[in-house]
Image (cartoon, rainbow, N blue to C red):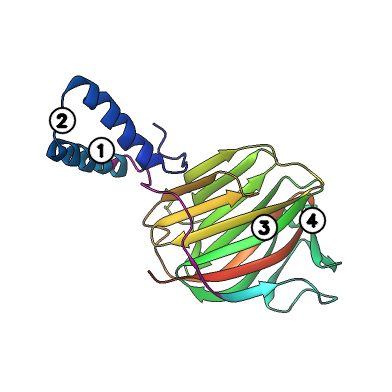
Amino acid sequence: MDSARGVVSAGGEVERRVMRRYSILFPMTFLHKCVLVAGAAAFAAAIGVAAEAGFSARGPLVFKDDFSAPTLDKGWVGNLGTWEVANGAVKISELAANKHAAVRRHSMQYHDAIFEFSFQFNGAKMIGLSLNNQGGHVCRASITPKGMILQTDQPNKTSDIKTAKLATLDTPVDTGKWHKVVVEVHGRRMTGQLDGGKIISGESPRVDVGKADFGFAIAGVSASLKDVRVYEVRAQ
């Protein structure tokens, strides 16, 4: 099994398969079943499969931007690419002279959070939600016309820590249509969903750190962004 590919209730499916196979081969008492379920769950965890992939309950709204002002809010920091606000959205394009994706970041201290935004491709090759701390990049969700990837990042160009995929979703993402993305970071787990479809999730200790900002990166010309929201994760 590819541990980088997260799916809904992946760990639960592993447990069910193990139960079905051994219940056919051997008669089981209730105690036997309990032991087997526990072992299957441990196996799922050992190969990096989340027992239940889903979103946490949302706490208070801590940030929103409807891009209703005539210009981009000053809280968005950066000078790469063009960012043009109009009609409740911001149109973003990479500039060839920058030799880098169009990027803006917004300061916010957090550890766990749920992000929500909508985007539209109009020629761009990628839009990414990047989560960062004082040491550099932490993790990101990247969407291309072919689907979505969740990954941990190389903090900076000189770091020995390399990028690692946590989960992937292969699905066409239509150009010229608005799409909705939800991304959560909670402890070691990163979870994502595109257009209310399949939830993907993966875990890494590199996600389980304090974070200092979030931002968006756009490769190519152009994409639009709107309805950015950030929520706290409700304490259990």
Closer mark to the observer between disc 4 and disc 3: 3
Secondary structure mostly taken by the magenta-highlighted segment of the chain:
loop
If you read the primary sequence from the N terminus, does the residue marked by circle 3 or circle 1 appear first?
A: 1
Q: CA distance from mark 4 to mark 3?
A: 12 Å
Q: Is residue 125 above or below residue 181?
A: above
User: Residue at horizontal 27%, vertical 24%?
Assistant: 21
Q: Earlier in the sequence, mark 2 or mark 4?
A: 2
Residues packed near mark 2 inside 10 Å, few (<14), some (14 to 19) or many (20 plus): few
Q: CA distance from mark 1 to mark 2?
A: 15 Å
From this viewpoint, which residue is outermost toward the top? 25
Residue 57 lies within the magenta run? yes
The structure residue drawn at horizontal position 56% and vertical position 45%, both measured from the top left corner, is: 149
The disc at residue 40 is 1
Q: Which residues are magenta?
A: 46-60
Q: Sequence order check: which comes first, mark 1 or mark 4? A: 1
Q: Which residue is mark 3?
A: 217
Query: Dot 4: few (<14), some (14–19), or many (≥20) neighbours within 10 Å?
Result: some
Which of labels 3 and 2 is toward the front? 2
N-terminal of the two: label 3 or label 2? 2
Q: Amino acid at mark 4?
A: Leu
Residue 45: x %, y % from top left: 30, 44
Residue 194 drawn above or below residue 136: above
Residue 85 is situated, as x and y percent measured from the top left of the image, at 83, 68
Per the image, the residue denoted by label 2 is 28
Compute the Cα span from label 3 to label 2.
54 Å
